[in-house]
Amino acid sequence: MSYDLVIVGGGVHGCTAALFAARGGMKVALVERGALAREASGVNAGTLTMQMTRVALIPYALRAHAMWANAREWLGHDVGVVVCDGLSLAFTEQEAQLLSYRAGKRREAGAPIDLISGTEAKSIEPGLADGVLLAGHCRVDGFANAYLTGLAFQRALREAGVDVLEYTPATGIEREAGGFAVLTSAGPVRGKRLLLAGGVWIEPMLGWLGIRLPIKTLVNQLAVSERVQPVMRTVVGIANGLLSLKQYPHGTVVIGGGWQGIGDRERGGVELVPERLIGNARLACHAIPALRAARMVRAWAGLEAETADALPAVGPVPGIPDAYVCGSVHSGYTSGPYIARLLAEHLLGKEPSLPLFPIDRLLAPATGREGLT
Ligand SMILES: Cc1cc2nc3c(=O)[nH]c(=O)nc-3n(C[C@H](O)[C@H](O)[C@H](O)COP(=O)(O)OP(=O)(O)OC[C@H]3O[C@@H](n4cnc5c(N)ncnc54)[C@H](O)[C@@H]3O)c2cc1C
């Protein structure tokens, strides 16, 4: 049998594109080497924020935030979304300047971020430390429980009639009359169109097509505390981006901020760097002093993809009709549902409501391999 669309990679991008393509009438197969959303899309910090989103992505992230806030409507299943205020803090003059600049740019792009004093910030977040000079305040913020993403999509995709092939690694792609054959451990999966949504593994996947698109792999560390009494009610960050902090309804506090661990695309996130976990935790306690009494119970690392210009790779694969790519979206959990829905609309022949991010700008010289493996 031949599908209308075969998607490789079951993170937030692959799953959302599959869902909307199937609802639009396509027969879709989704090939995932593990379980759905167990890489970046299942181990991320869950923050749904404008304050850390690249300026060019703000219009996308605002629409995606609205989708997450109504996840029950379009996804049909709960991912524990909490919509709350977000604060980005400046403790020094230098941070205040950075914050003013960044908040100004994001505001111009449509993010409703106001600059407020430390006193005003404390009235919004009583748990804050003293000494905040300036804060960016955004009402369009919040977080999800990323761990629930895979389960929610698994149910939604089955209901939409998508053939979900979990624990089925793709190993190559062949081009055939009328489309593609994705080679997998369970045999070829054939489709008229192909979408590569493999997160940091988009680079080797495009390599199967003879296309070289360098993707940087970030190894983001995160930590979570034991359950504690309520110590905060907003999403808290720092102007330089080195902190992201929120407390889940059941009491745990997730601490992140892009502090890097050790790992790569081949091995995954293999090692945490304790000094960086400690640095991250110190910043957290500096912002929310009540956290000093909390114990950290678990830490982990996940892989985030970044292109050379840190903007997404979303659109057709040049020179290979009917092949598409979707990924490398900074703060891609926040923006992912909207961006992948845009691509699904494009595949369904609709005029997308915002532009895609064509990948021509990112391509390195060809590897010399002709055609497909
Ligand atoms: C630790 C961490 C914290 C983050 N925090 C935030 C945050 O707070 N807010 C935010 O907005 N963003 C955050 N991000 C970024 C966000 O998680 C990612 O941008 C987003 O989830 C990427 O989704 P994706 O679908 O492109 O990739 P992924 O979720 O990585 O999905 C790619 C999928 O492809 C599959 N795959 C790979 N190779 C094969 C193969 N050969 N065959 C079949 N399947 C294959 C993988 O198993 C994987 O499931 C964070 C990222 C990390 C790592």
Image (cartoon, rainbow, N blue to C red):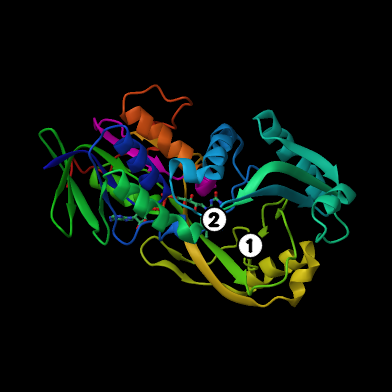
Q: What residue is rendered at 65% in x and 30% in y?
A: 110
Check the image and report above or below for 284 versus 211: below
Q: Quadrant of ligand 1?
A: bottom left
Q: Are marks 2 and 1 in contact (CB under 8 Å)?
A: yes
Other-residue count near label 1 (Cα within 10 Å), few / some / many at <14 / 14–19 / ≥20: few
Secondary element type, mark 1: loop
Tell me which segment is drawn in magenta: 317-334
Percent of width and height locating residue 187: 13, 55
**As drawn, 186 above or below 196:** below
Dot 1 beta carbon under 8 Å from ligand 1: no
Residue at image mark 2: 80
Q: Earlier in the sequence, mark 2 or mark 1?
A: 2
Q: Residue at x 70, y 35 (%)?
A: 112
Coordinates of residue 109 in the picture (x, y in percent): 64, 30
The kind of residue tagged 1 is Pro
Question: Quadrant of residue 357 in the image?
Answer: top left
In the image, which disc is placed on residue 249? 1
In-front residue for pair 219/143: 143
Question: Hey, what amino acid is under mark 2?
Answer: Gly
Residue at left 56%, top 74%?
298
